[in-house]
Amino acid sequence: MMSPDPFLAKLELARTAAKSFATITTGQKNAALEAIASAIEAGIDQVVAANAIDLERGRANDIGAGLLDRLTLDAPRLRALAAAVREVIALPDPIGQVVRGSTLANGITINQVRVPFGVVGAIYEARPNVTVDIVALALKSGNGAVLRGGSAAEHSNAVLVSLIQEAISSVGLAGDAVQTIDEFGREGASRLMRARGYVDVLIPRGSAGLISTVVQESTVPVIETGSGIVHVFVDATADEDMAVEIVTNAKTHRPSVCNAAETLLVHRAAADRMLPRLAGGLLQAGVELRGDAATRAEVEGVAEADETTWATEHLALAMGVRVVDSIDEAIAHIERYSTRHTEAIVTQDYTNAERFLAEVDSAVVMVNASTRFTDGGEFGFGAEVGISTQKLHARGPMGLSELTSTKWLVRGSGQIR
Amino acid sequence: MMSPDPFLAKLELARTAAKSFATITTGQKNAALEAIASAIEAGIDQVVAANAIDLERGRANDIGAGLLDRLTLDAPRLRALAAAVREVIALPDPIGQVVRGSTLANGITINQVRVPFGVVGAIYEARPNVTVDIVALALKSGNGAVLRGGSAAEHSNAVLVSLIQEAISSVGLAGDAVQTIDEFGREGASRLMRARGYVDVLIPRGSAGLISTVVQESTVPVIETGSGIVHVFVDATADEDMAVEIVTNAKTHRPSVCNAAETLLVHRAAADRMLPRLAGGLLQAGVELRGDAATRAEVEGVAEADETTWATEHLALAMGVRVVDSIDEAIAHIERYSTRHTEAIVTQDYTNAERFLAEVDSAVVMVNASTRFTDGGEFGFGAEVGISTQKLHARGPMGLSELTSTKWLVRGSGQIR
């Protein structure tokens, strides 16, 4: 019955093997995770050797220092990966949780319980650590995983997947539930996007371009983990110290991640009082500022902002600054340019705080807190599946339960309609 | 700023108007629903006249008695539609419900609350009643609606949408949040499927072909309300009277709907004892049976089943019957042919009941109850949005809360990381 097409054969293997994951116990899953963590530690030399081939090819192809760094797996990074797998062991198992239930008037009981999706597909780029992260989260939520990690990391991924498969099999479970399709190249990625019936959900992780391609081309349902053009609005009544701390933290604490702020909006009534200190703090921290005319009139050393400033996720020490006349203008700016990830207001005005929370349509909307708190770990979810910027299924930080579906269990005693 | 493209201009109108729905009160929504119900009652003559044009064209195009019946709107049907809108008034408003929340160790509070999607797109065929149903559900859940009801019902839909728009405006809300795109024909339907950024979720309702087209072509997230190849498995230990009642009810109570049973699986150890009575009851009710060799050896008047029998949603008084050697064979048959809507086991064996519930991967899995209970009304959800056969976002009967997304509200007092 196995497909003669080697690509589909792999997907069938994963699908069949993953079925058995739906009914295994938490103890069995945790044993597999522990085996994976141990296998990574025991296989450090093997992984580093394979990674060296990928790195050499990357250097030959001149992929750049940033990509090379993301591609690199050394002993400390592999030990950290093993530790991350062990952290997933400590998380509660979402499968079998009863979401809601009731007894109908006719005596039938209905219970909606969490079940695995089946097979989770992941498409990512040049980050072999994602291979291990995704497998750990998929396994704990009872799912198989089909991985397209990109040709740049092909050798590293092949060894990691092979170690993972053996580790899962070593505790008596179906190691085939994890597969890599890197060897099928770009065509494999395209086919994965159209593998309805084989893969239940597809999670792209990487650049905006990659995510956009997957969203456009995929017929498999996608969970979009999007980019963040994140705004902080400093209202007229903002506490000055608090505003400076929040804006500086939101921009500079870790500028390369999606919950870092990209645009600062300041109420005109607060501009005189606060803009010099806000901008000064940012400039001192090495942030390159691009502002509108009002900002540049208040602060020296600010470049001229243009339309692209507001529409850019800098992911670096750069920030757009604009003075707005009102909370309405701030909300309108956000409405126009936000990627609907996270926005924050800094204010002491109760009505404005509640208006901002109600009217800004983003996954996470904050009052008087740094946008850096949009994070599964900070929210108490434990593991980092990603941050969804779509509205369907999951929105905002995703925990293990966002990697599950549900089904209804109905128990009767002969009822008919 | 309005697009010069008349299609996009309509979508922009809907999107802008729908934004205001996110923050209106339940009282305002209910007032709009009451106005819609009254407008439909007051507009009966107008709708019937427009419907007559559609019916005449339908007869000229020879669309068949079934389609003509579904296309027909007369005074009693319109009064029933108005009554259905009033039933939605009585349902709880899902918007603003707190799904979960907590206070983090640093004092920040996080609350996940239900918010509208924004604009719900609907693609359906020749059933102008769906126009009113979808609008009522969308409005109560705070969403706008862009409707493609098909050219066969174009005149009826145009009058209904115009009545709805005026009714919403009459209570001071944004009537433009509801739009029909029937006048753009098939190209409009195709464009709606690619209207990312304008429409937040697309719900196809209709034939398997329509749903499949939308799933394949849409770049807007889709909620698939799928077809039902629904199975009833009569286990060796089934109570005979209960089995006959459940099977007959599941097949004959309303054969044209998706939760009606299509295939009967009978354990070999129960075939001698029960198959003649099970089949007899079905044959007596006018059901055409297609069975495997073992079934045909037990019962007269059963046609020969072939591969297509098991893969067909008959939606009529027809049923496939197969004798299986074990619960494993029953589960394997379901795994192969089910559309993952609803399956039921009739059994007195505790272990088999729990195995069936755990191992069958369908939206609803039942023990000793008629599959006809897979229904939003029966589950206590009130309104019928549809029954989802996909795993993402919603699975099984959908209530108003399945027409919502969520967002996280974060309230701090100056916290930074």
Image (spheres, coloured by chain):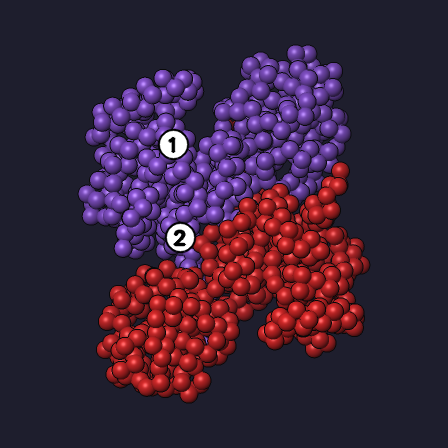
Chain colours: A red, B purple
Query: Badge 1 sits on which subunit?
Result: B
First along the sequence among labels 1 and 2:
1
What number is the disc on residue B197? 2
Label 1 Cα crowd, 10 Å radius (few <14 / some 14-19 / many 20+): many
Q: Residue A212 location, x and y as percent? A: 50, 56
Mark 1 vs 2: CB contact within 8 A? no
Q: Residue B399 location, x and y as percent? A: 43, 43
Q: Residue B395 location, x and y as percent? A: 52, 44
Looking at the image, residue A91 sits to the left or right of residue A154; the answer is left
Looking at the image, residue B200 sits to the left or right of residue A180; the answer is left
Residue type at numbered disc 2: Gly
- Inspect this view and state whether residue A271 appears: yes
Q: Residue A37 location, x and y as percent? A: 72, 67
Q: Residue at x 25, y 48 (%)?
A: B174
The image quarter containing residue B289 is top right
The image quarter containing residue B90 is top left
What number is the disc on residue B150? 1
Q: Residue at x 34, y 61 (%)?
A: A335
- Image position of A21 with respect to A281: above or below: above
- Image position of B334 with respect to A280: above or below: above
Q: Residue at x 38, y 70 (%)?
A: A309
Label 2 secondary element = loop
What number is the disc on residue A177? none
Looking at the image, residue A52 sits to the left or right of residue B168; the answer is right
Query: Badge 2 sits on which subunit?
Result: B
